[in-house]
Amino acid sequence: MGGAVTEGIAWQWIFWINVPIGLAMLPLARTRLVESHGPNSRLDLPGVALASIGLLGVVWALVRGNGAGWLSAEVIGATVVGIAALVGFVAWELRAPAPMLPMRFFRSRAFAAANAASLAMYFGMFGSVFLLTQFLQLVMGYSPLEAGLRTLAWTAMPVVVAPVAGALSDRIGGRPIMAFGLALDALAFAWMATIAGPDTTYGQLAPALVLAGIGTAAFFAPVANVVMGSVRPEESGQASGATNAIREIGGVLGVAVLAAVFANQGDYETPTAFVAGFTPALTIGAITVALGAAAALLIPRKRSATAPLKPAIQPA
C-alpha cells in the first residue's frame, strides 16, 4: 500500500490513509467496545507533562540529528531538555500518589526484560527496513510499488507464523519464542549485510527476508502476553502505554542511528556507494537485535500449571 500510494499519488498521502479508516471504525468502537477504568481516579497531570516534554525532546533530537547536525545547538538543546524532563518524570513518578507509570513495574524481571528486548527489536527492524526499501529501489532498480511487493516476503510472514508462535507461547511461555524470533532476525539482518552488493539479485535476498519475517512473527506473538502478565489486570493499560512508548522510541532511535551510520560510510550517488553505507548499518542492526535476544532470555520461565500463582508485582 505504501509503495502504491507513493508511486501513484505522492508520499505525503501515506499520512491520510488512516483518516477514513479511523472514521469508519468510530461507530464500531462506540457500539462494540466496552469502557474500562484503571485503579486511579485522578489524572497524573505532572507526569503527563514531563513525559510529553521528555519524549518530544528526545525524538526531536533523533529526527533532526542527521539534518541539523548532531552537535548543533538545536539537537543538543532538545536532547538536554528531553533527558532532564525524563529524569524529572522518573523522580515524580516515584513519589506521585497516583502515578501514570508506576516505577515498580520495572522491578519485575519479565516487564523490564521484555521491554528491553522490544526496544532492541524495533531499533533493528525499523532501521533496517528503512534502508532496505531504498536498497530495493536505488540498487536493484525497482519502483516504489515493486519494492513494496517484494518486502511482502518479510512483512506477510507474520500472518502465517504468528498464530503458530502464539499457540506455542501459550504452552511453553514467551521467553524461548521471543529469544528465538530475535535470534532469527539478527541472523537475517547479518545475512542481508553479508550478501548486499551492486549486483545482488532479489532471489539471493528473498530467503533472508523470509527468515526475518519468521523471526518478527515469533517475537510479535508472545510479547504482549509477557508484558501484560507481569502486572495486575487493572494495570494493563499503564503497562501497555509504557510498552508502546518504548516501541516508538526504539523505532525512531533505529532509523536515526542506522541512517547516521549509513551517511558516515556511504551515499546515494551510485549503487556501490549505497552498499558501502548499507552494509555497516545493517550490521549494527543485527548486533542490536542479538542483544535483544539476550535480554529476552532474562524473562522468567513459564510456571508449571500446578505451581501456586502469585502476583508478578506486589502492591507498593
Image: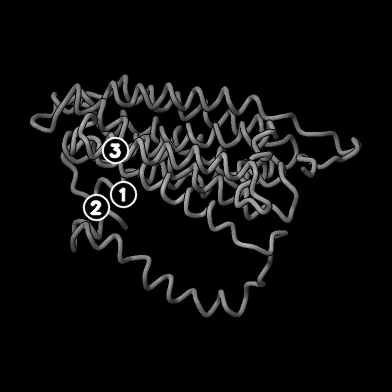
Q: Are marks 2 and 1 in contact (CB under 8 Å)?
A: yes
Q: Secondary structure at mark 2?
A: helix
Tell me residue 56's x, y (percent). 37, 48
The label number, if any, that marks residue 273 in the structure image: none
The label number, if any, that marks residue 77 in the structure image: 3
Q: Is residue 258 left or right of residue 121?
A: left
Badge 3 density bin: few <14, some 14–19, many ≥20, Cα 10 Å: some
Q: Which amino acid, mark 3? A: Gly
Name the image quarter holding the N terminus.
bottom left
Q: Is residue 304 left or right of residue 33?
A: right
Tell me residue 297's x, y (percent). 63, 25
Q: Quadrant of residue 268?
A: top left
Residue that sits furthest to the left in the current view: 269
Q: Are marks 2 and 3 in contact (CB under 8 Å)?
A: no
Tell me residue 235's x, y (percent). 69, 52
Badge 2 density bin: few <14, some 14–19, many ≥20, Cα 10 Å: some
Q: Earlier in the sequence, mark 1 or mark 3?
A: 3
Q: Which amino acid, mark 1? A: Leu
Name the image quarter holding the C terminus.
top right
Label 2, label 1: how far apart the Cα atoms are: 6 Å
Q: Which residue is mark 1?
A: 149
Q: Secondary structure at mark 1?
A: helix
Residue at 69% across, 33% down: 107
Q: Which residue is mark 2?
A: 145
